[in-house]
Image: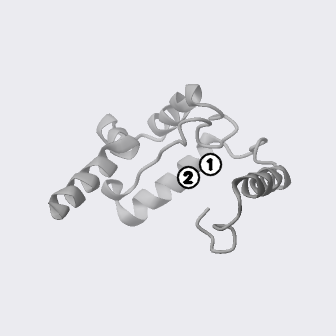
């Protein structure tokens, strides 16, 4: 959406393009699962630490995973984190506490 080549397009043209792009990539038929995202989360935590990693959905359609296809399946990601041995406090950080901490710091700096 922020691409200089598309930012001046009319809404109809952009949304037609976006729909066709999703069709080509078969984004409505994801093959990755929560366990795959779990591998990526483990790697990020190992590299930069639990205090600097976060996960989120797009609120409407989830995380785009085969087993996290809508917001009602968000628990599948939490279950994957539990399965991987993450403590409740670390899961809370991943699901939003890290974001809130940084956001509060930025707001404090802006004030």
If the image is split into quadrants, where does the N terminus sit? bottom right
Q: Is residue 103 left or right of residue 1?
A: left
Q: Is residue 63 above or below residue 2?
A: above
What residue is at 65 percent from the left and 43 percent from the top? 64
Q: Residue 109 in the image: x percent, y percent? A: 17, 64
Which element type, helix, strand or loop, lies under badge 1?
helix
What residue is at 83 percent from the left and 53 percent from the top? 20
If the image is split into quadrants, where does the C terminus sit? bottom left
The residue beneath circle 2 is 39
> Most extreme residue toward the front, as rendered?
10
The residue beneath circle 1 is 36
Q: Is residue 39 left or right of residue 55?
A: right
The colour style of the image is one colour
What residue is at 45 percent from the left and 60 percent from the top? 44
Q: Which is nearer the eye, 57 or 85?
A: 57
| Mark 1 → mark 2, Cα distance in angstroms | 5 Å
Q: Residue 39 in the image: x percent, y percent? A: 56, 52
């Amino acid at each position: 959406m922020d691409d200089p080549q598309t930012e001046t397009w009319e809404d109809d043209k952009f949304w037609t393009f976006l729909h066709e792009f999703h069709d080509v990539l078969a984004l409505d038929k994801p093959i990755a699962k929560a366990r795959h995202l779990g591998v990526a989360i483990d790697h990020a935590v190992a590299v930069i630490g639990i205090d600097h990693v976060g996960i989120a959905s797009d609120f409407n359609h989830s995380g785009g995973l085969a087993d996290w296809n809508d917001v009602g399946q968000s628990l599948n990601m939490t279950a994957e984190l539990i399965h991987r041995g993450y403590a409740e406090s670390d899961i809370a950080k991943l699901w939003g506490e890290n974001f809130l901490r940084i956001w509060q710091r930025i707001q404090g700096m802006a004030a």
